[in-house]
Image (cartoon, rainbow, N blue to C red):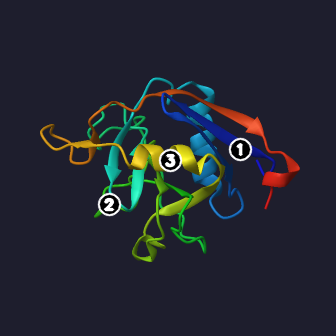
Amino acid sequence: MERMGAVVETNYGAFRFRFFPREAPNTVKNFIKLVRVGFYDGLHIHRVAPGLYLQGGDPKGDSTGGPGWTIPLERNSHSNRRGAVGMWHAPLYVNDAGSQFYVMIAHHPKMDKTYTVFGEVWQGMDTVDRIAHLPLDSTRGQPGAPLSPVLMTRVRLEPLPNSARP
């Protein structure tokens, strides 16, 4: 897992991130398991919190869905800085994460130790920024939904090149 990362391919481009398996072993294993069964393929980045993060991985598309199980919070020393990848959970229920993940657009230390940071983007922040600046549709039920859908066409695992390893 130390030498593995993920590629998230979207209709707006791709981004790559490395995992933090020592600091968030269960979260990394859970994400890898979901990727291997194709769980994320065809799902959307369904939410943009302007100036904070992108959120995806919800089969319902309304921030309430998941894979059918939950995993507990793994507090660690990684900060929710720009490019951090974390596992989303309902704000009051820290142990109900499942499949939804976020990518930080900017540093937001108030989220530190309340969400599991399990990776970090090493390539493709331009794609993340492109998605972050899309117009949002406030008329749909989900606040922060991009007006134009952001489809995760494929999420896959890949070996990390030496330049991407911490």
> Dividing the picture into quarters, in which one does residue 158 lie?
top right
* Residue 5 - label: 1
Which residue sits at x=43%, y=43%?
131
Q: Is residue 6 left or right of residue 105?
A: right
Q: Are marks 2 and 1 in contact (CB under 8 Å)?
A: no
Q: Disc 2 vs disc 3: which is toward the camera?
A: 3
Which residue sits at x=68%, y=58%?
20
The percent position of residue 106, horizontal first and vertical second, equals: 47, 65
Q: Is residue 11 left or right of residue 83?
A: left
- Extreme residue in the left direction: 139
Estimate how packed mark 1 is, as few (under 14), some (14 to 19) or many (20 or more) residues with alpha carbons within 10 Å: many
Q: Amino acid at mark 3?
A: Val
The percent position of residue 117, horizontal first and vertical second, equals: 55, 61
Residue 69 or residue 57, whichever sits in front: 57
Which residue sits at x=31%, y=31%?
148
Q: Earlier in the sequence, mark 2 or mark 1?
A: 1
Q: Disc 2 vs disc 1: which is toward the camera?
A: 1
Residue 9 or residue 78, whichever sits in front: 9
Q: Earlier in the sequence, mark 2 or mark 3?
A: 2
* Residue 127 - label: none
Q: Earlier in the sequence, mark 3 or mark 1?
A: 1
Q: Identify the secondary structure beneath mark 2.
A: loop
* Mark 2 lies on residue: 93
Q: Amino acid at mark 2?
A: Tyr
Q: Disc 3 vs disc 1: which is toward the camera?
A: 3
User: For the C terminus, which image quadrant?
Assistant: bottom right
The percent position of residue 111, horizontal first and vertical second, equals: 42, 70
* Mark 3 lies on residue: 128
Estimate how packed mark 3 is, as few (under 14), some (14 to 19) or many (20 or more) residues with alpha carbons within 10 Å: many
Q: Amino acid at mark 1?
A: Gly
Estimate how packed mark 2 is, as few (under 14), some (14 to 19) or many (20 or more) residues with alpha carbons within 10 Å: few
